[in-house]
Image: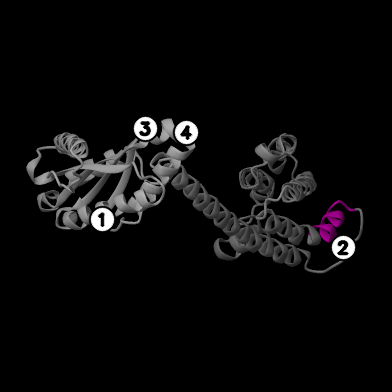
């Protein structure tokens, strides 16, 4: 608006020319731009003292603005003064924040250099300190102001890009934190919290999907004996070995979890249950061949189609796992070790 009055647009278009209104916009320029750079540069956070000093860009222009109506002959000088002070404080603030590593401030500094360089030629002449060095000083200032606006647009775009990058990093950190809450810290597979969520989620699906749901509740037999005989480091080694074997089975239709202690579980599609039974028998043999000859696997199977809720499904699998464990113990006592599936 200030440049519109300077170039005589209201007079040309509407026949209106009022110097009282002309200077108002130049007094408002430091006020509005300071509101911008305080937020853009996050000056209160980075340099609180500069933020306090910047208040002069609010106070002084508003105190001198009435001169547009009561002392028009000096309004031009007062506007020159407030703009000069604003340029110095804004440029110092931009350089200070840039020195802290805030990259969008580089466009901000360039923007103020673009407007300050013409100002160094024109403002001293406004004060009468030197004669006018150039003709069409208003045009030169307008060009500097235009370049200032373009560079400030780049600065805003750069800050948006920076905020987007920070947002992505924050989401990545959040994702890692959420993954930690769902991961067993010892074995690296999903934990009880993740299992409860997954099972409940599956039970909230459509009925056809629920009917395809099968649960394996697994107990790693012999872990206590390993801990008592060889120590917990060896026991942890056994848990990691077993968990990695279960993790190797994972796919879109199979998920492995450690519930705690020596209890694990698998959520699978019903059609894949026979293949899982064969895989568990193979894993049991591999574990025994890996230096844990006294360990074994007991498990119970339940199907969603026979359960009214996720809790009922878990209870059924737990009961059948216990039956499987008892039957294997009885078989060992009679020196007969069958591979049975209690389903």
Q: Which residue is mark 2?
A: 132
Outermost residue toward the top in this view: 228
Point 10% across, 40% down: residue: 307
As drawn, is 199 to the left or to the right of 167?
A: left
Identify the mark nearer the N-term, 3 or 2.
2
Q: Residues within 10 Å of mark 4 (few under 14, many from 20)?
A: few
Q: CA distance from mark 1 to mark 2?
A: 91 Å
Q: Which residue is mark 3?
A: 224
Tell me the element at label 1. helix
The label number, if any, that marks residue 197 in the structure image: none
As drawn, is 182 to the left or to the right of 74?
A: left
Q: Is residue 13 above or below residue 245?
A: below
Q: Which residue is mark 4?
A: 231
**Which mark is nearer the camera, 4 or 2?**
4
Identify the mark nearer the N-term, 3 or 1.
3
Nearest the viewer among 125 and 88 is 88
Q: CA distance from mark 4 to mark 2?
A: 91 Å
Residue 216 visible, this angle: yes
In the rendered image, residue 99, in percent from the top left (x then y), is placed at 76, 49
Taking the magenta stretch, the answer to whether it contains residue 243 is: no
User: Which quadrant of the figure contains the C terminus?
Assistant: top left
The stretch of residues the image draws in magenta is 119-128
Specify how the rendered protein is coloured. one colour
């Amino acid at each position: 608006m200030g440049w519109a009055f300077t170039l005589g647009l209201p007079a040309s278009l509407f026949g209106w020319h009022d110097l009282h209104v002309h200077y108002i916009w130049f007094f408002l320029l430091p006020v509005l731009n300071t509101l911008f750079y305080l937020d853009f540069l996050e000056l209160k956070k980075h340099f609180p003292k500069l933020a306090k000093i910047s208040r002069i860009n609010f106070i002084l222009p508003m105190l001198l603005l009435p001169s547009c109506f009561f002392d028009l002959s000096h309004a031009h000088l007062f506007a020159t003064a407030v703009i000069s002070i604003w340029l110095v404080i804004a440029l110092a603030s931009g350089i200070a924040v840039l020195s802290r590593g805030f990259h969008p401030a580089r466009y901000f500094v360039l923007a103020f250099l673009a407007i300050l360089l013409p100002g160094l030629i024109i403002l001293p002449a406004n004060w009468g300190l030197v004669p006018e060095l150039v003709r069409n000083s208003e045009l030169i200032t307008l060009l500097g102001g235009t370049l200032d606006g373009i560079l400030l647009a780049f600065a805003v775009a750069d800050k948006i890009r920076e905020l987007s990058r920070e947002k992505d990093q924050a989401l990545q950190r959040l994702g890692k934190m959420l993954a930690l809450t769902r991961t067993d810290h010892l074995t690296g597979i999903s934990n009880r919290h993740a299992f409860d969520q997954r099972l409940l989620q599956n039970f909230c699906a459509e009925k056809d999907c629920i009917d395809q749901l099968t649960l394996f509740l697994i107990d790693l037999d012999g872990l206590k004996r390993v801990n008592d005989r060889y120590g917990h480091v060896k026991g942890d080694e056994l848990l990691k070995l077993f968990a990695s074997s279960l993790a190797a089975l994972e796919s879109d239709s199979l998920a492995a979890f450690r519930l705690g202690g020596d209890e694990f579980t698998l959520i699978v599609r019903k059609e894949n249950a026979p293949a899982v039974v064969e895989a568990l028998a193979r894993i049991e043999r591999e574990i025994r061949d890996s230096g844990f000859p006294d360990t074994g696997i007991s498990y119970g199977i339940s199907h969603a189609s026979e359960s009214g809720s996720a809790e009922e499904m878990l209870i059924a699998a737990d009961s059948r796992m216990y039956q499987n464990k008892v039957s294997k113990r009885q078989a060992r006592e009679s020196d007969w070790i069958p591979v049975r599936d209690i389903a």
